[in-house]
Amino acid sequence: MAVRSDTKQPLTAPPSPLVLCFAALLVALFAVSFAVGRLVGPVAPGMHRTAPGTAPADERDMGGMTMPGGHR
């Protein structure tokens, strides 16, 4: 069986310069935002995770505040 030599492989075009510039812009923005975040520090330094096995706090509980018609 003879192999045909006239079959062409599909040509793949390189990415356009616009796509490369957009990717470079995304990388630069990520790098700048990461650097600023490292400089600023933690957003909520006093916030800690709950210990494993403990029940999460009720999100509606406001530390003794009561609402009209509420049951306590």
Image: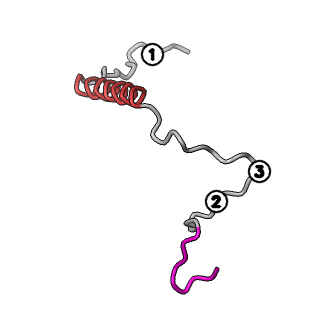
- Magenta span main SS: loop
Secondary structure found at label 2? loop
Residue at the (48%, 42%) spot, across then down: 44
The magenta segment: 64-72
Q: What amino acid is labelled 2 in the image?
A: Ala
Whether the residues at callouts 3 and 1 have beta carbons within 8 Å, the answer is no
**Mark 2, residues whose alpha carbon is within 10 Å: few (<14), some, or many (≥20)?**
few
Name the one closer to the observer, 47 or 15: 47
Of labels 3 and 1, earlier in sequence is: 1
Mark in front: 1 vs 2 = 2
Of residues 18 and 2, the one drawn nearer to the viewer in this rendering: 18
Measured Cα–Cα span from mark 1 to mark 2: 72 Å
The front one of 30 and 70 is 70
Structural crowding at the residue carrying mark 1, measured as other residues with C-alpha within 10 Å and reported as few (<14), some (14–19) or many (≥20): few
Q: Nearer the viewer, residue 59 or 24?
A: 59
Secondary element type, mark 3? loop
- The residue tagged 1 is 4
Residue 58 position by quadrant:
bottom right
The quarter in which the C terminus is drawn is: bottom right
Amino acid residing under circle 3: Gly
Q: Residue furthest right?
A: 53
Q: Quadrant of the N terminus?
A: top right
The residue that label 3 is drawn on is 53
Disc 2 versus disc 3: distance between alpha carbons? 12 Å
Q: Which disc, if any, is residue 57?
A: 2
Q: Is residue 9 magenta?
A: no
Query: Please, is residue 51 above or below residue 14 in the view?
Result: below
Q: Are marks 2 and 3 in contact (CB under 8 Å)?
A: no
